[in-house]
Image (cartoon, grey):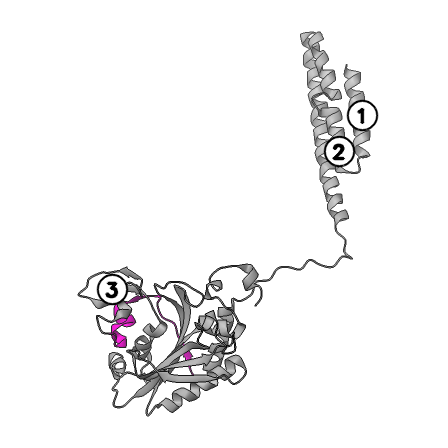
Amino acid sequence: MIEELKKLKEQAKQEIERIKNSQELRDLEVKYLGRKGELTNILRQLKDLSAEEKKKIGQLANEVKNDLVEQFCQIKIEVEANKKREEIDLTLPGQKFARGRLHPLSQVQYQLEDIFTSMGFMVLDGPELESEFFNFEALNFIPDHPARDMQDTFFVEEGRKSDPNNRLVLRTHTSNCQVRAIKEYGAPLRAIFPGRCFRHEATDACHETTFYQLEGLMIDKEISIAHLISVMKTLLTEVFKKEIKIRLRPGYFPFVEPGFELDISCLICGGKKCPACKHSGWVEILPCGLVHPNVLLAGGLDPKEWSGFAFGMGLTRLVMMKYGINDIRLMQSGDLRFLEQF
């Protein structure tokens, strides 16, 4: 039996050296070390031996088995390395890595920031979870104004009703940054405030509970409506790279006086009326007006000395017009089939 073990070891060694691929390796492992392999068949004969012979033969059998296992492990490493080298074809073209891209909202926001910074505006930010004071009261919203109703606003925490700064809401507009900026930087001031807003809306093709705005504020001496119109026309021409048909109509907003609605002709239907423009041919995109004296007072400025204009642009709707998107809900859908088009 000793001779059988020595012969098996030598034969296995020769066959292992001739192995060329992983299939041959697996077959050889089964042949010698499997449950019905040659080494197992030899060890089954131990039951017929004496105790002294079992000890001697068993020790030799373990040595042979360990030696074969070590050889198989070594040749396995070599076979796998050769396999990897064979799989690499340096003449093939490289694999193209998937690249991320900016969301269309981010693309337009960065474009607007570049336009406004070229006109001397700062780009500022403010909290999305805001006190009711900065979101409403500092902007001249009276306590029982409809915009404070639950239908329009997500109240996060009531807090102490006696302390308006402790009543928190998800901001309904980026106008909450106006008084914060005036308090921080004083006047003269040119700043824009892009960001996310929230309203308790019934969602449809042109309304969503989460949307983006870009608020703008310019304060200086002797600012007039002419300055407002000039900046707005420059903005729209730069964004759309062409002259855009607009209309300016009176509108009420507590933080401006007088207030206006600046509409643009629907670029999706060309003014022919579609769901995106509520079948009117026009899209309300840019509420604006001269800063209300009470807002200047809330920021610590004298309205007799300083004046200014403010505007709130719907970034999400601007993106819809720019790219011809007919449903606002696509913006927050996370659908890569939609996003990869930009």
Describe residue 207's horizontal placement relative to residue 269 as left or right: left
Sequence order check: which comes first, mark 3 or mark 1? 1
| Disc 1, SS | helix
Viewer-nearest of labels 1 and 2? 2
Q: Which quadrant is home to the C terminus? A: bottom right
Q: Mark 1 sits on what residue?
A: 10
In the image, residue 163 sits, relative to residue 140, either above or below, namely: above
Which dot marks residue 25?
2
Describe residue 306's horizontal placement relative to residue 274 as left or right: left
| Disc 3, SS | loop
Q: Mark 3 sits on what residue?
A: 167
Residue sitting at x 22%, y 74%: 142
Q: Which amino acid does label 1 sit on?
A: Glu
Question: Residue at the bottom extreme?
Answer: 222
Q: Distance between the residues labelled 3 and 1?
A: 86 Å
In the image, residue 160 sits, relative to residue 45, either above or below, namely: below
Q: Where is residue 265 in the image (x, y as percent from the top left)?
A: 47, 80
Q: Distance between the residues labelled 1 and 2?
A: 17 Å
Front one among 274 and 311: 274
On whether residue 180 falls in the magenta region, the answer is no
Q: What stretch is highlighted in magenta?
A: 118-141
Circles 1 and 2, Cβ within 8 Å, touching? The answer is no
Sequence order check: which comes first, mark 3 or mark 2? 2
Q: Which quadrant is home to the N terminus? A: top right
